[in-house]
Amino acid sequence: MTKKSKMAYVALGANLGDSAVMLRRAVVEIAAGSLGKAVGSSLWRTEPVDCPPGSSPFLNAALGICPKPDTTPESLLNDLLAIETRLGRTRSGLPNSPRVIDLDLIAFGDETRHTSELILPHPLAHERAFVLAPLAEIAPELVLPGQLCSVADLLNLIGQVGVSKVEPLIHFNDR
């Protein structure tokens, strides 16, 4: 993978069932769509943010992939939604409700979108420690489109309250 390769970053989260197993299963499926080496963060335990009362803590992670040449942000989002469905995600209609898996496309190179289906970069990524902490682990110098500082700097600005590293997610071999 060359320095100019376009990277896509996905945030993963779960707080129902065996979250660690579910995140690892999702990572394997997402990484299969990478042109080269996928880069995964550790698992991070995070307190629920803007969730219904009584929600369990989440496990979160981040994954960086090099999309294949014919992959678009929209096609990657569709792939992520299909993975969620295969892994048993159902949508209750209640915002931020507990879930077995949640996959969010955070960034796709320097591309931006603002449609009813997709907003890139993810509109809240720069405000959420549960996204920034795992992302800073794998891409600390990444500057999300529209931001003026790196992911690591954004994390330093907001702090890591309610976020702690638990264990390595998974190691990938070069393909």
Image (cartoon, rainbow, N blue to C red):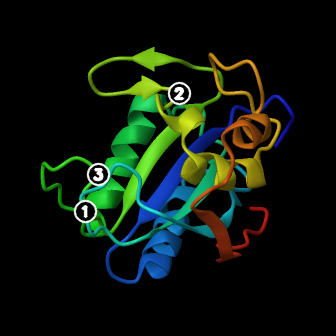
Q: In which quarter of the image is the N terminus?
A: top right
Q: Is residue 138 above or below residue 68?
A: below
Instruction: List x then y, in percent, for residue 9.
Output: 60, 43
Residue 117, by quadrant, is top left
Looking at the image, residue 4 sits to the left or right of residue 45; the answer is right
Question: Would you say 86 lies left or right of 15 here?
Answer: left
Callout 2 secondary element: loop
Earlier residue among tags 2 and 3: 3
Q: Within 10 angstroms of label 2, few (less than 14), some, or many (20 or more) residues?
A: many
Instruction: Write down the residue under mark 1.
Output: 53
**Numbered tag placed on residue 96 in the rendering:** 3
Residue type, label 1: Pro
- Crowding at dot 1, Cα within 10 Å, few <14 / some 14-19 / many 20+, comes out as few
Task: Report, in whole angstroms, how far the alpha carbon at label 2 lies from the one at label 3.
Answer: 19 Å
Percent of width and height locating residue 175: 74, 62
In three-dimensional space, the C-alpha distance between marks 3 and 1, rounded to whole angstroms, equals: 11 Å
The tag earlier along the polypeptide, 3 or 1, is 1
Q: Is residue 32 visible?
A: no
Secondary structure at badge 1 equals loop
What amino acid is at disc 2? Pro
Q: Which of marks 2 and 1 is in front?
A: 1
Residue 70 visible? The answer is: yes
Residue found 57% across the figure and 61% down from its top: 162
**Residue 83 vs residue 129: left or right?**
left
Q: Do the residues labelled 2 and 3 touch (CB within 8 Å)?
A: no
Q: Looking at the picture, does residue 16 appear above or below residue 153?
A: below
Name the residue located 46 percent from the left edge and 28 percent from the top edge. 123
The circle drawn on residue 25 is none
